[in-house]
Image (cartoon, rainbow, N blue to C red):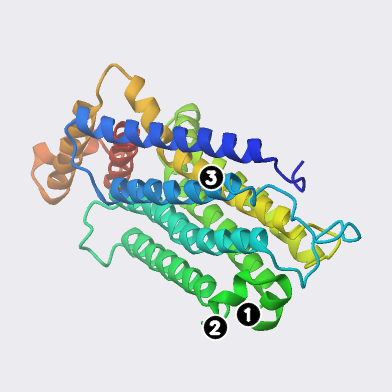
Amino acid sequence: MLMATQSPATVVAVTAIMLTCDVFVVSLRFLARRQRRQPLQADDWLCFASLILSFGLSITLFIGVAQRALAYSTPTSTALLPRTALEMSNDKIIIVSRIQYIFLVISVPTLGFIKASVLFFYRRIFVVDKTNLRNVQNLLYISMLTIVGIWAMGFMFSFMFACKGNFVAWWTSAISLIENCVNTLELFFAFAVSDFIFDCVIIITPIPMIWNLHLPTAKKLGVLLIFLLGILATVASLIRMIWVIWARAVGFDVSLDQNLLITTSLFWNMLEISISIVASCLPVLRGLVRKQTMDSWVHSIRDMLSLHGEQLSDESVDSAKLSSSKSEVPSNELHVVTVTVERVREY
């Protein structure tokens, strides 16, 4: 169940499996670039950076479980206290709280890298002249990348300095966290909700352009399906947001084991990151199983686009006849067709 706590075996197994999947799909992504002799670009390197950070996140979880702190009930000093009291502090609580702090500080830029990777990919395929700041789509993606960068840096520093420089207060006890730090429950809530909203916005951004293509509905749906593979990450983000909303509602309830609550929180956070990496790379799997490269298609369409632009500026009779034969496919839509085919090829 969503609100249930995870066992040590579950945390280790799921984390290891998802990390393996991440390594696999990112490796396929780089393999696809090499096979097609394409240079690695910003979206590829950002995806790789998120994979490196996910290694660090996985290691923190493995260490926590290995020390019998994460995914284990908090040991109590007396049988009269079956659950963790807010004032209690012991080595297991300190270990779990430190892991939580490190995990949060690393997870924020990891999610930021994944979102930026997708946005850079959108910009690469939908914006032909990236130096043209008058292009609405170019400005849109630059603005979204800027906002994502500010969002990631803002929450990273918010978690890093949540206790206003008194770092020990985070991992001393729950009451110390409450008295010396900002309202961390509200901070978790703001982060989870904004993360989910960003995922939704990123998912729907390319839909209008694709749907306006002069293509059969079946082909439109096929292209949309490739783009909407990222909805898997949005679902994971939604699940984590629901859990955070529940945790915010119960607060620092002394009847609940805080170590197990932290374990569940980190588990869903890790799952979201791993699924996001996989979802951002899934289209490359489709590209690798295709036996026929689409390079010639892309070059042909780009040639058509270039020729079409020249014909619009040429007032000769021959040019006018040739242009009329393509009147049903506007220049801007040739751009979209080109980049849509290129996305299937490259991602």
Residue at 51 percent across and 48 percent down: it is: 273
Query: Is disc 1 in contact with disc 2, using a CB cutoff of under 8 Å?
Result: yes
For marks 1 and 3, the one nearer the N-term is 3
**Disc assigned to residue 181:** 1
The answer, for residue 207, to whether it is visible in the render is yes
Q: 157 above or below 301?
A: below
- Tell me which amino acid carries mark 1: Cys
- Name which of mark 1 and mark 2 comes first in the sequence: 2
The residue tagged 3 is: 62
Relative to 90, does residue 288 appear above or below in the rendering?
above
Q: Name which of mark 2 and mark 3 comes first in the sequence.
A: 3
Q: Residue at x 69, y 71 (%)?
A: 173
Residue that label 2 marks: 164
Q: Secondary structure at mark 2?
A: loop
Instruction: Tell me the distance, in whole angstroms, between the alpha carbons under discs 2 and 3.
Output: 29 Å
Q: Left or right: where does residue 243 sit relative to residue 277?
A: right
> Is label 1 or label 3 in front?
3
In the rendered image, residue 247, in percent from the top left (x then y), is placed at 75, 60
